[in-house]
Structures are given as structure tokens and as C-alpha cells.
Image (cartoon, rainbow, N blue to C red):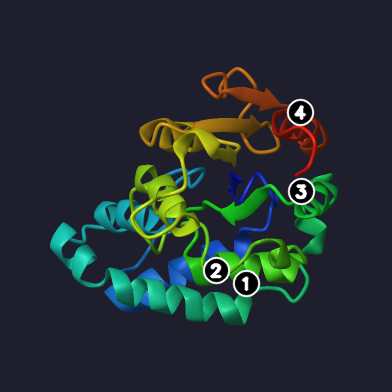
């Protein structure tokens, strides 16, 4: 069984981040009582970062202490998820990257893969986002890893492998592939000793993603590469 760990924003969906960003900013304002300026909201590029990492960068720039950020991290997560549930559009299907539905459908028909998520989104946000996009059913609950599991994205592949394996026996590294669209996806895969397939559907081009084990120009090309890797369906 191959474990395929999909990033969300830029990989499965493109442009479905406005309500997510608004929910995060509302949570930071409500929980910490800080006034966030346009400059402070641009202090960090969100691509490839986890939600708590983004929150920390914005709050540090706003003058909030690291101790206070840590103490209120769970409150920020809870409030962000609550606000996102209210703001998330009912239909996000228009944001699904072209070719992704066909790719997920073809992979779900196989008996030799586990489809899971590896994303910096809080899990509640990730699950709702994909449900509203119409592709949430391809990813089973209890699998994957999320920003709500760890602020450090490099820690997420090991968490996902542990959930996909047996007690005391995480899913093997050699049978795991991270699929993403940023250098941080590549770096987190490398940190756990697993491979990464990158796709240029996000903000980075092929040259910037050159450290991946393979780089694809589209979901259609990614599908061909994955099926070539997997061989005949088991």
C-alpha cells in the first residue's frame, strides 16, 4: 500500500483561501485583542506554512509575546475554526484544480493506495474546505496530518505515517509520497526521509520546485506520473 499525502491549497484547490484568511484574522483580533494592520497581515507568505505558524508570525510582528502566543494557541485554533464554519461558502467546487477530480477518482478505484491529507490547515478547516469543494469524501477521517497537529510542518509526515500504520509500526517511508506545490512541501518530506512529487499549480514554478523527486506541470501530468509509479492496480 502506498500512502499518498496531498497538500490542499495550491495542490487540490486554487484560490479558496479568502474565508480562511478572514477567519484567522478575526480569531487573532478577538483572542489577543490586537489591531492588525495591512502591513502586519502581509508580514508572512502563507504558502506552505501551517496555520499556527502564520498566526505566530503575525502576532510577533504585532508585538505579542511568544509566551502569550503559546498560551492562547488553542483558543486561536478554536475561534478560527468557528468563524471559518460561518464564513466558508457553501460551494467551493469552482476552486478545484483542473484534473484533480479525475485524479482522485482514478486513485480511489485502486486497492493499493491510501489517500490522506498533509496540510498546514487546521483539520476542521481542511475537512470543511474539501467537503464544500466536493472532494472531501476521497480522504478518510483518522488519516493524514494537519496544522492542528503541530506548528512545524516538518513534523507532519511522521504523524501521517503513524496514523496510516499499525501501533508501533508507522507506514514505511519508502511507500510514502508527499504531493504538494511549494518548497516547504518538499522540505517537510525530506525532513522525514520520504519522497515528494511537486506540481506547479500553486505559486511556484518548476525551477523553484526542482528539489522534489519529480515535478509535474498539471494534475493530469501528476496522474500519469503517479500511475506510472504505482504500476498495475492491486
Residue position for label 3: 107
Question: Seen in the image, is 31 located left or right of residue 123?
Answer: left
Residue lying at 69% horizontally and 47% vertically, measured from the top left: 112
Local SS, label 1: helix
- Contact, CB < 8 Å: mark 4 with mark 2? no
Residue lying at 59% horizontally and 39% vertically, measured from the top left: 180
The quarter holding residue 202 reads: top right
Q: Earlier in the sequence, mark 4 or mark 3?
A: 3
Q: Which mark is residue 125?
A: 2
Local SS, label 4: helix
Residue 183 appears at what percent x and percent y?
50, 31
Local SS, label 3: helix
Residue 1 appears at what percent x and percent y?
61, 46
Question: Seen in the image, is 164 located left or right of residue 193?
Answer: right
Mark 4 → mark 2, Cα distance in angstroms: 32 Å
Q: Earlier in the sequence, mark 4 or mark 2?
A: 2
Q: Residues within 10 Å of mark 4 (few under 14, many from 20)?
A: few
Mark 2 → mark 3, Cα distance in angstroms: 24 Å
Residue position for label 1: 128
**Residue 33 can be seen, yes or no:** no
- Contact, CB < 8 Å: mark 2 with mark 1? yes
Mark 4 → mark 1, Cα distance in angstroms: 31 Å
Amino acid at each position: 500500500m502506498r500512502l499518498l499525502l496531498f497538500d490542499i491549497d495550491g495542490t487540490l484547490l486554487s484560490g479558496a483561501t479568502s474565508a480562511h484568511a478572514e477567519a484567522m484574522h478575526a480569531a487573532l483580533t478577538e483572542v489577543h485583542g490586537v489591531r492588525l494592520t495591512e502591513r502586519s497581515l502581509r508580514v508572512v507568505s502563507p504558502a506552505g506554512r501551517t496555520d499556527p505558524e502564520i498566526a505566530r508570525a503575525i502576532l510577533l510582528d504585532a508585538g505579542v509575546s511568544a509566551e502569550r502566543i503559546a498560551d492562547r494557541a488553542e483558543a486561536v485554533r478554536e475561534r478560527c475554526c468557528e468563524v471559518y464554519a460561518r464564513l466558508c461558502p457553501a460551494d467551493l467546487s469552482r476552486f478545484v484544480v483542473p484534473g484533480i477530480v479525475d485524479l482522485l477518482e482514478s486513485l480511489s478505484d485502486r486497492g493499493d493506495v491510501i489517500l490522506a491529507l498533509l496540510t498546514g490547515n487546521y483539520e476542521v478547516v481542511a475537512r470543511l474546505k474539501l467537503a464544500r469543494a466536493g472532494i472531501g469524501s476521497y480522504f478518510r477521517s483518522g488519516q493524514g496530518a494537519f496544522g492542528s497537529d503541530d506548528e512545524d510542518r516538518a513534523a507532519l509526515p511522521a504523524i501521517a505515517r503513524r496514523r496510516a500504520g499499525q501501533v508501533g509500526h508507522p507506514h514505511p517511508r519508502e511507500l510514502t509520497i508527499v504531493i504538494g506545490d511549494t518548497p516547504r512541501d518538499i522540505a517537510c518530506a525530506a525532513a522525514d526521509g520520504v519522497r515528494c512529487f511537486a506540481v506547479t499549480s500553486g505559486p511556484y514554478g518548476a525551477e523553484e520546485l526542482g528539489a522534489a523527486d519529480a515535478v509535474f506541470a498539471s494534475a493530469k501530468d501528476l496522474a500519469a506520473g503517479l500511475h506510472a509509479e504505482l504500476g498495475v492496480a492491486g
